Amino acid sequence: MGLEIDYIDGQTPLDEDEKEGLLIKAITTRGELDEFEQQNIEKAIEWTLKNNFKKENIFTEKFVRELHKRMYGNVWKWAGEFRKTEKSIGIDPVKIGVALKQLNDDVLFWIENKTCSDEEIAIRYKHSIVKIHCFANGNGRHSRLMADLIISKIYSKPVFDWGQSTLSISNEHRKRYIKAL
């Protein structure tokens, strides 16, 4: 029996080839998948806490991909690789690298020129990278961690309260979050 995922509103479905990238074949349910992904994400968060990243390092394709790989690399073979398939959200997969480079250059400009508040810069980046939709899975969680890195590592402010415990289930909080995106 393969992986059967019940998707909730706002989640981007994986195609069969992407599902084949599951490294832990014993996982068969969404709950099991969520648990293993969360363990991996917590390790990635520990990595970010132990390192003092500079903005020049954060806003690179290499870093964006490395963070995703650290978040999902023990669960998905394709972690850290740009998606190769069309999704209901996101740009054409062949344009991901160029769009990400433009976004990273833009945010460096916003930071250096103080074009808006610290929080707005972090949220604009989060929104823009999720709109690009670099990866087959985990874009929302990845973009939230990127925003947290911007606000904490660049501006030395506390990370955002995303209401994480309620974003993984279908409820009113998640509906407002998806609508805001």
Image: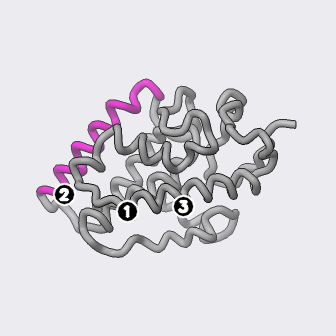
Name the residue: 47% across, 74% down: 161
Q: Is residue 148 visible?
A: no
Display coloring: one colour
Task: Identify the residue at image location x=35%, y=44%.
Answer: 63
Query: Residue 170 is drawn in which quadrant?
Result: bottom right
Q: Could you tell which of marks 1 and 3 lies nearer the N-terminus?
A: 3
Front-lying residue, 141 or 74:
74
Q: Is residue 67 visible?
A: yes
Asked whether residue 43 is drawn in magenta, I would say no
Q: Quick check: marks 1 and 2 in contact, CB under 8 Å?
A: no
Which residues are drawn in magenta?
93-112
In the visual, does 37 lie left or right of 156? right
**Residue 15: image x %, image y %?**
68, 32
Amino acid on which disc 2 is placed: Ile
Circle 1: is it few (<14), some (14-19), or many (20+) Cα within 10 Å? few
Residue 127 in the image, given as x and y percentages of width and height? 41, 53
1 or 2: mark nearer the eye: 1
Residue at far front of view: 50
Where residue 50 is drawn, which disc sits there?
1
Where does label 2 land, which residue? 111
Does residue 104 lie above or below 91 as drawn? below
